[in-house]
Image (cartoon, rainbow, N blue to C red):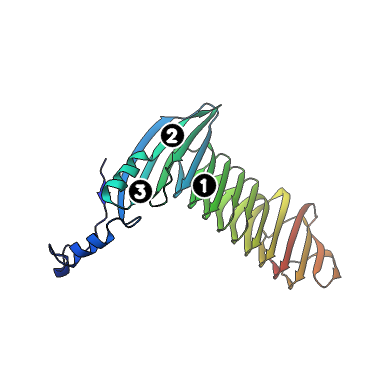
Amino acid sequence: MSVRHRDDGLAGSSMGREGGFGSLLRTLLAGVPWSEKAEREEVLHFSTPASENFRIHNANGRTSVIGEDRSDIEVRALKTARAESAEAATHMLDSIRIIHGLDGDVAEIEVDIPSRWNRRGYVNLTVRVPRSLSTEIIASNGKVGVRNVCGTVRARSSNGSVELYDIKGDIEISTSNARVCCCDTEGKLVARSSNGKIELTNHCGSIDASTSNGLIRVSINILGREGVQLATSNGRIVLELPDEVDADVDIRVDNGVIRNDRPLCKATRERSGQLRGRLGAGGCPIKLRTSNGSICLR
């Protein structure tokens, strides 16, 4: 393990010579909160629980989970601390802990970062797991990414985007102020965002997605039995369906327009902002709602 302190980049210049501007700048910055930085990487390995359930808590930092052909769980934690001095940054780095153990039958890791007004720390996690593992991620400030997993995925992030790729299993995503992006997924997908767009590409299965402020764009390869429900208060909705699909369509717009590129049987417009009809033999429900924006069905 190594500790790296911030290089202010002045050593190689004429102004960075001993007694020069670099020395003066460092003197002026001494004691300023977060002016010094220290980093260290920690690697952990532990056994996969028999339940194949895994939970991650990371309050500050990026969390990336990668499914692989392996039997254990590997955690690489890049710890970063910033403080008013090099010694304080190193001291804070030493106090950042990666706690792991079992909560019932669930393997769990948690990042513990001490809180000080003039110091801050964060941990970027790269976690490699067996593909079949079911994973839950709880993050407060940081991006969440999961790929190449065949188990259930649950992800919650308060301030950070959530990106999922190549997932075969039910998905549940919630983020407050960021984007949700899923590609090449299969199963029941539930996505929620307060202030961010939702983009779901090449999905096989049912979808329930909503956001308060943002675009929702969805493309489906195979429609699930529970259908599709998309809703946004302020934003556009674009839904692309496979060529052959059996569904009952119900579209409603309060302030906006409806663009439909699909032939609907028994199509009715109860009012200017509502369209209902049937695709193929009907059956799976498709409900699209926006208060302020357009809806496009392709």
- Spatial distance from mark 3 to mark 2, Cα to Cα? 17 Å
Q: Secondary structure at mark 3?
A: strand
Q: Amino acid at mark 1?
A: Ala
Q: Amino acid at mark 2?
A: Ile
- Spatial distance from mark 1 to mark 2, Cα to Cα? 15 Å
Quadrant of the drawing holding the N terminus: top left
Q: Locate residue 248, reporting x and y percent.
A: 79, 57
Q: Is residue 184 visible?
A: yes
Q: Quick one: label 1, few (<14), some, or many (20+) residues within 10 Å? A: many
Q: Secondary structure at mark 2?
A: strand
Q: Quick one: label 3, few (<14), some, or many (20+) residues within 10 Å? A: many
Left or right of 235, for residue 250? right
Looking at this view, is 117 or 22 the one in front? 117
Residue on which disc 1 sits: 139
Question: Number of marks in the image?
Answer: 3
Picture quadrant of residue 51:
top right
Residue on which disc 2 sits: 99
Q: Amino acid at mark 3?
A: Thr
Q: What's the residue at 16%, 67% (across, down)?
A: 13
Task: Say which mark, if any, is on residue 80.
Answer: 3
Q: Is residue 133 visible?
A: no
